[in-house]
Amino acid sequence: MRAAGPAAETELMLKGYGLTTAELYYRMPDHRHVLNSFIWQEYDLAPDYPELFHFIEF
């Protein structure tokens, strides 16, 4: 869920959302010797984290 400013962030927090950060490590099939990292940060609902799992399934 994307926040569009300070007021939107406050509204999300009042609904129970919190800022969630995940650092993902992955390898590409054609470059197995290279380890890539990606940092994902978004407002999400704990403990189920629907936004995070939607991103991971993508």
Image (cartoon, grey):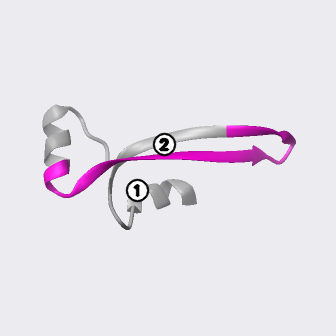
Q: What SS does tag 1 mark? A: helix
The quarter in which the C terminus is drawn is: bottom right
Residue under label 2 = 40
Magenta region includes residue 20:
yes
Q: Is residue 43 left or right of residue 28?
A: left
Magenta stretch mostly in which secondary structure? strand
- Residue type, label 2: Trp
Which one is earlier in the sequence, the residue at label 2 or at label 1?
A: 2
Picture residue at 20% right of the left edge, 32% below the top? 5
The residue closer to the viewer here, 42 or 58, is 42
Which region of the structure is painted magenta? 13-36
User: What residue is pinned by disc 1?
Assistant: 51
Tally the numbered discs.
2
> Mark 2 to mark 1: distance in Å?
11 Å
Which residue reaches farthest top?
5
Rendered position, 55 above or below 40: below
Q: Which secondary structure lies at badge 2?
A: strand
Which residue occupies 59% across, 39% down? 38
Q: Position of residue 49 (x, y in %)?
A: 39, 61
Provide residue 19's location: percent of width, then percent of height: 32, 46
